[in-house]
Amino acid sequence: MENVTIRMLAERLQLSTATISKALSNSHEISEETKQRVLALARELNYVPNPYASSLRKKASHTIAVVIPEVADSFFAEAINGIESVAQEKGYHVLIYLTHENSGKERGILKDFQSGRVDGVLISVTTETASAPHGLDQLVKEIPIVFFDRVCEDVIAAKITTDDAAAAYKATSHLVAGGCRQIGLLAASPHLSISNRRAEGFLQALAAHGLPQNKAAVTYCSNDHATTKQLLKKIFREQQYDGIIATTEKLATAVYEVCEEMNLRIPQDLQVIGFSNLSTARFLNPSLTTISQPAFDMGKAAATLLFKALKNNSFALSEQQQVIPSALIVRKSTIAT
């Protein structure tokens, strides 16, 4: 017969594992009614405490987890460097978990953290993670969590973001200043709050400059590079854009490839701006104008908040919100100076 665990008791009673554990240890924090419910189910299921697991939970692992979609994106590589700079100073190890933009894999990773493997979590969610996140709202009650860059708006937790709407507004205004009148925005997913905020800033800028607020100008692309390229070829033939904002590095790369294959000249036929931290952006032909995000600073800020929570149990981690501004770096893929 399968051993009965605290997790099983929690699921049956719709309580957190922390509440179950405190009830079993007769904590004053738990009401008498809840204690009796927990003890009754424990007796019914013949729950036997695991002293080894209990000792592990009481002992800090001195390890934190970083959950990200990928490492190929230079944003996440820089963010990890920022996180490491804080973790090393605190004497902690950092485990990197890759979701590969798969919400099922993300769900499995998060479930694994309930075993007490790590002391805290820094996470940037997948493009598949919808507004009703799988288990994140429960996990934040059991372990310190900080979202960075890609956040879940519906989860009450600490969040480190950049000024996505303002950055997209700035990028759009720059293209308008360069003479663009038919501007499109390429986004990763309608489920990501950062994609939606960038779309909002883009549409606001169009309105401010007297251009039509055409929501069809916002195109949500695939995670698959080949599929995205086919989509770009289709919209470039149909829409005749003179300006494009690519909100991820992969999308900016796809735009350059498609322009070369369709004999579109950058910036003469199409001006391009990318949200990117690529150090090689200045070496592209032509060099890419970018919205450069403060990835290192965001990673460092997220880790700093997490360690404050690990050091002080009374620190109101879930109330912490920080917005770190990004910057427009003008290069030769656009005309305005």
Image (spheres, rainbow, N blue to C red):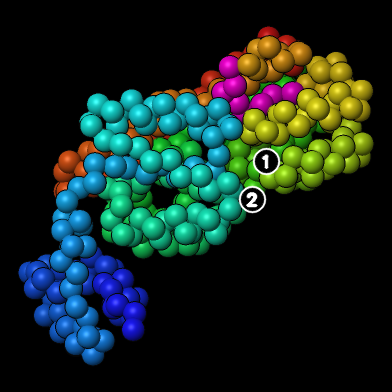
Report if the CB atoms under discs 1 and 2 are less than 8 Å apart.
yes
Q: Could you say which quadrant of the image residue 207 lies in?
A: top right
Dot 1 alpha-carbon crowd within 10 angstroms: few under 14, some 14 to 19, many 20 or more: many
Q: Could you say which quadrant of the image residue 159 lies in?
A: top left
Residue 190, which numbered label? 2
Dot 2 alpha-carbon crowd within 10 angstroms: few under 14, some 14 to 19, many 20 or more: some
- 273 part of magenta stretch: yes
Q: Residue at x 50, y 33 (%)?
A: 76
Q: Circle 1 is placed at which residue position?
A: 187
- Residue 298 x/y as whole percent: 41, 31
- Identify the magenta region: 272-279
**Toward the viewer: 8 or 243?**
8
Q: Hey, what amino acid is under mark 2?
A: Pro
Q: Residue at x 36, y 63 (%)?
A: 138
Which image quadrant: the N terminus? bottom left
> Does residue 31 appear in the picture of this structure?
yes
Looking at this rendering, what residue extends furthest in the front direction?
A: 1
Q: Residue at x 86, y 23 (%)?
A: 260
Q: Hey, what amino acid is under mark 1?
A: Ala
Q: Residue at x 27, y 68 (%)?
A: 17
- Residue 276 x/y as whole percent: 60, 26
The number of numbered badges drawn on the structure is: 2
* Left or right of 175 in this view: 299: left
**Toward the viewer: 176 or 335?**
335
Q: Considering only vertical position in the picture, is 232 above or below 26?
A: above
